[in-house]
Amino acid sequence: MKYSYQYPVSQYTRHSTYTPTTHYTPSLYTPKYYSTSSYSPSNYSSVKYTATHYTPPAYTPAYKSTSTYTPVFSKPTRQGSSHRAPAQRTPTVVVKPAKAVRFTNDVLFQDHVRHGELEMIGRFMRARKVRVDTIFQSGMAALHEAVLSGNLECVKLLIKYGADVHQRDEDGWTPLHMACSDGYPEIARYLLSLGASAEAENENGEKPADLIDPDCKELVKLFEVGCV
């Protein structure tokens, strides 16, 4: 044991003081210079390495593309020495504008009468562009056209501007013949009030009453014996 606990500390006595006998003087260490003996390696001749050129073997793909395949968007191949034929030009067709068709005043006036355009009829009459007794290409005058349209106001307007209630068309029909044949009792009554003749005959010898449809009771009653 390093310590003995049987004796008290006061009885513990150090041993005599240690006095080194000799002083240690380190000697200078002078290393010996290491001179390598002439080392002659065995005759070692390094083999000169000459690299050989590596040539990879020809690679042949497993999939062989068919020579007949032509992609859709591939550019067309140029034909050897053949020249490309110039594209044929389509001749330019010049369409000339159609000439404006101008109708005569008589044709325009007849159209206004058929459609009952009272304002336009009044303009033509006041400007004296047409004659109210003119026979149109249809073979009738303006008053005949107005009666056939069934427009009583147009009939009144034309009579106001001088239309004759006795005027005949190319077949000898009077406006009253037209009113009876087409079943317009109001127009027939108005014409009769202005003195239209119920005894007038056309080229076939027919009177206005002869052209009345028996089912048109109002006209039949208007032309009863003694009523006209």
Image (spheres, rainbow, N blue to C red):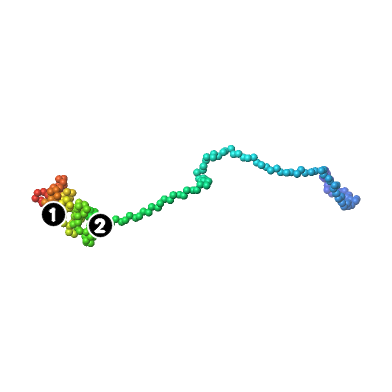
Task: Give the quarter of the figure containing the N terminus.
Answer: top right
Amino acid on which the number 1 mark rests in the picture: Ala
Q: Which mark is residue 196?
A: 1
- The answer to whether residue 101 is above or below residue 82 is below
- The answer to whether residue 205 is above or below residue 130 is above
Q: Which mark is residue 28?
A: none
**How far across and how far down the image is residue 22, in percent?**
90, 51
Name which residue lies at 31% across and 56% down.
100
Marks 2,1: beta carbons within 8 A: no
Residue 188 in view of the camera: no
Q: Mark 2 points at which residue?
A: 104
Disc on the earlier residue, 2 or 1? 2
Q: Which of 108 and 15 is in front in this view?
A: 108
Name which residue lies at 81% across and 43% down.
43
Q: Nearer the viewer, residue 137 or 13?
A: 137
22 on left or right of 58: right
Residues at marks 2 and 1, CA–CA distance in whole angstroms: 31 Å
Mark 1 neighbour class, 10 Å CA radius: few under 14, some 14 to 19, many 20 or more: many
**How far across and how far down the image is residue 190, in percent?**
15, 54
State the residue lying farthest toward the left. Answer: 226
Amino acid on which the number 2 mark rests in the picture: Thr
Name which residue lies at 40% across and 52% down.
92
